[in-house]
Image (spheres, rainbow, N blue to C red):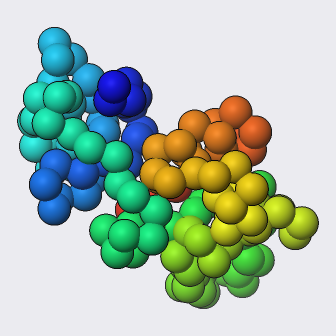
Amino acid sequence: MKKKFVIGDIVQDGTFVSTIKKIENGYAVLGMNYEVPLERLNSVKIGSGKDNGIVLECENLRAPIVSPGKSAPKRNLKPYLENWVDNITSISSIVESKGFKYVDELQDWLRENAPDCYLRLRI
């Protein structure tokens, strides 16, 4: 049985990996307004290489203080598996302890347990 995907899930349609922006009438609208039937979508396997462009964002991280007239420094985002939800819990330890095999399983866990953190595709 296939997972029921929700808005925000990172999925793949063949080799194309994207985020679901909208679900309507059995179709998902992915990035760049690409429409695909829900039954064609698959979960992205963790460590498959198709997950290389995914990063972790946490809203509870403070932005750097920037002087007036100066631009904010560019953030160097690491792949999601190399990040931490907090200073105690690493994403890789969550994946290992929970036995997650797919990115959307981790996304479900984050929504439930760390609502300030989410996965997104690196732009």
Q: Position of residue 30 (x, y in %)?
A: 21, 42
20 vs 40, nearest the viewer? 40
In the figure, is residue 20 to the left or right of 55?
left
Expressed as whole percent of the image width and height from the top left, the position of residue 37 reads: 11, 29
Do we see residue 123 in this rendering?
Answer: no
Q: Residue at x 68, y 61 (%)?
A: 96
Q: Name the residue rendered at 46%, 62% in the picture.
A: 46
Residue drawn at (34%, 46%) of the image:
43
Identify whether 18 is placed above or below 84. above
Above or below — where is 36 with respect to 47? above
Q: Is residue 24 above or below residue 96?
A: above
Up/down of 91 relative to 99, above or below: below
- The structure residue drawn at horizontal position 75% and vertical position 39%, both measured from the top left corner, is 113
Q: Position of residue 83 (x, y in %)?
A: 67, 72
In the image, 47 versus 19, the foreground residue is 47
Picture coordinates of residue 110, whole percent (x, y): 65, 44
